[in-house]
Image: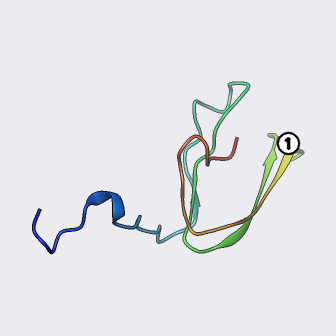
Amino acid sequence: MNKTQLPHSIVPERLPTTTQLLTNYPNPFNPETWIPFQLSQNAEVRLTIYDVTGKTVRKMELGHLTAGSYSQTEKVIY
């Protein structure tokens, strides 16, 4: 490694350019599912899940989160 290269471990993570929900897994028909997401800026995060008739099934308040990717198992919505 030359003097101008930084080790990969100290290079900061690139922030997402858009805020978005990503594909949940394993799938929505299992009794449990994980929902990864990205925040382009710090934000209060809430998720409301509706059934096919529009009735609220579950509400989750995640609170204030910093910008970044929430795709690792310990960071996703569960």
Q: Is residue 50 above or below residue 39?
A: above
Q: Quadrant of residue 10?
A: bottom left
Q: Residue at x 57, y 69 (%)?
A: 67
Report x, y in % for residue 25. Answer: 58, 35
Picture residue at 58% right of the left edge, 30% below the top: 26
Which colour assignment does the render follow? rainbow
Residue 31 placement (x, y as % from top left)? 73, 25
Left or right: residue 48 versus residue 65 is: right
- Where does residue 16 sit, x and y in percent of width and height? 47, 67
**Does residue 28 lie above or below 46 as drawn?**
above
**Front in this rendered view, residue 76 or 19:** 76
Q: Nearer the viewer, residue 49 or 69?
A: 69
The structure residue drawn at horizontal position 46% and vertical position 69%, both measured from the top left corner, is 15
Residue 43 location, x and y as percent? 69, 71
> Farthest top residue?
30
**Quarter holding the N terminus?**
bottom left
Left-right relation of 70 to 17? right
Q: Which residue is mark 1?
A: 53
